Amino acid sequence: MDEITAQLEDATAVTLLLGQRSAETTAAACTWAREWVHRIQGRGRHRALLHANRLLVSCLAAAGRNDEAKQVLASIAAQCADRDMIRYLLDGGPYVVSTLRGLRDDQLHGLWRPEWTPVPSAFLDALSATKGPTLI
């Protein structure tokens, strides 16, 4: 329970760092988010790992590390596609939504990289068609 609370508190702090929009705070946010991903991997906390990776995507995109953000996002988007979790990705915030848009564009234009986890095009299309506060 303590680790869950710590992760949520840290996720909030990382999000606040991203709001400052400086190179230093964005780099710190990336490091912090990546630490959570490494801490949770292999521990059977699949939802927590998904959350940590979604936060990492935001950090990487905010830092301008778009290719790395797309690679992480493709991995979690494939997981979400398997579970029909459309809203989860869209609720990840503007950096996740922007990166989703980039993934979809890459897929539509044949620019999908071989190192990215495949994501069904129907899923990315469904994300694009979903109505709500954060559309791609």
Image (spheres, grey):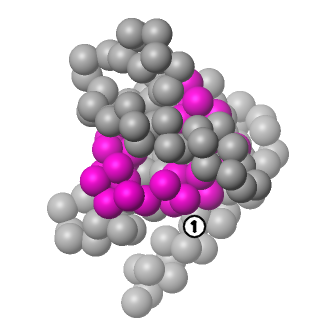
Q: Residue at x 69, y 44 (%)?
A: 135
Q: Residue at x 50, y 43 (%)?
A: 126
Residue 132 shown in magenta:
no
Outermost residue, bottom side: 1
Whether residue 51 is situated above or below residue 102 in the rendered picture: below
Outermost residue, right side: 20
* Type of the residue with mark 1: Asp
Magenta segment, which residues? 74-102
Q: Main secondary structure of the magenta part?
A: helix
- Give the image location of residue 70, x and y in percent: 45, 30
Quadrant of the frame with the C terminus = top right
Residue 79 shown in magenta:
yes
Q: On the picture, is 49 further left or further right than 70? A: left
Taking depth in this image into account, of 36 and 68 the one nearest to the observer is: 68
Disc 1 secondary structure class: helix
- Give the image location of residue 111, x and y in percent: 40, 10
| Residue topped by disc 1 | 10
Q: Is residue 39 visible?
A: no
Whether residue 80 is situated above or below residue 21 in the rendered picture: below
Q: Residue at x 36, y 68 (%)?
A: 47
Q: Is residue 67 visible?
A: yes
